[in-house]
Amino acid sequence: MKKLLVVFMTVAVATVFADTPKFEDFKVKLTGVAVVSANAEDDKGVTPLPPQTRVVVTPGNEALFYLEYSFPTNVTPLMFLLANFDDDVLDSLSPFGIYASGVVSGVGKSKMRLGMEGALVNKPYEEEMLLKSVRIKCMLLPEKGAPSNKAFVICDAPVNVLFANKADSDGKGAVVLPPVPTPQPDLTLGIASLAKEEKPKSSTSSTPAGFTDNLDEALAKAKQEGKLVYVCFTGSDWCAWCVKLDRKVFAQPEFVPAVEKDYVLVYIDSPKDKGRLTERAKTENPKLIKKYGINRFPTALILDGDGNKVGETGFRKGGAKPYAEHLLDFKKKR
């Protein structure tokens, strides 16, 4: 049995305020890895394995990473886990998402999943991929009126996770995804400056044309017109996959006309720039994220007019037309 691998990366930065945390105050270690069903709500009955144990993740499953963290208690961090390899590779192969924890602080434990497109619908992966590292990042939420900071890397954790396209794969023919070198810390971050800073409000709404940010009105309309509701939970100005979904699907002129007969489209955004939201959305969007248990972006729920969940999806490759066809499949199955 291999020893548990403890992965720490700490860096320091000069601070302006005495109570401002430093990079070195943020610590995370990977303590275990497991395989769970993509449809499972928890990991009951699962025994974590040492972090660098080879695990095979077959279609319909996801990798589950067990983490321990030690963060300052005077800030509100959000932790992210993502596959650590170049975005150019990610664009050319089946994509992974970026998985977020809930808000964490102080000392504690967390579990985060990492899956691939198709895992929820048991579709084979387009390629076998052997992932050698996961990256753990952190983004601080606003405190006392201060602006949120850019996400910064806490550590890169070596792993040995094979995303296989068949159950008996040994991974010998898998595309190996080596880790990208850890970036140098951005010393301009300043971490969590508790000083208030007035930011100019954006005059541009983040809600795409053909979408609404009012879920209640969308549900009422869908019920009256016999439609389904597509609800996209997104981070429009910080989440890479959300930006791709906006540009490659929502912004394409053929998308809305292809689905509007069957769907009412809803956009629930969580941007860094809150000026992109209506006053109602600023209040309601966090409540909806909590209500529906959204823990990764983008997540798209398919609801009926009564608010019952019909299905779930997210970013998919191919562009607007295949995405529209994918959504219409949910309608055909009803």
Image: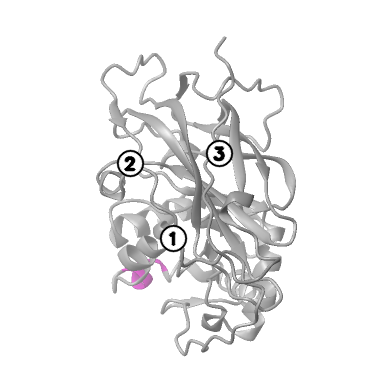
Q: Residue beneath label 2, please?
A: 94
Which is in the foreground here, disc 1 or disc 2?
Answer: 1
Indicate the secondary structure of the residue bearing disc 1.
Answer: loop
First in residue order: circle 1 vs circle 2: 2
Q: Position of residue 26 (x, y in %)?
A: 61, 49
Relative to 80, does residue 234 appear above or below in the rendering?
below
What are the residue bounds of the magenta stretch? Answer: 255-259
Relative to 141, does residue 46 appear above or below in the rendering?
above
- Please tell me whether the stretch drawn in magenta is mainly helix, strand or loop: helix
Q: Amino acid at mark 3?
A: Arg
Q: Residue beneath label 1, please?
A: 186
Of residues 111 and 183, the one nearer the viewer is: 183
Residue positioned 73% across, 42% down in the render: 108
First in residue order: circle 2 vs circle 3: 2
**Quick one: label 1, few (<14), some, or many (20+) residues within 10 Å?**
some
Circles 1, 2 touching at the beta carbon (< 8 Å): no
Which is in the foreground here, disc 2 or disc 3?
Answer: 3
- In the visual, does 318 lie left or right of 156? left
- In the visual, does 95 lie left or right of 52? left
Q: Position of residue 210 (x, y in %)?
A: 43, 78
Q: Residue beneath label 3, please?
A: 113
Relative to 303, does residue 283 appear above or below in the rendering?
below
Q: Position of residue 138 (x, y in %)?
A: 56, 54
Q: Amino acid at mark 2?
A: Ser
Q: Position of residue 183 (x, y in %)?
A: 38, 50
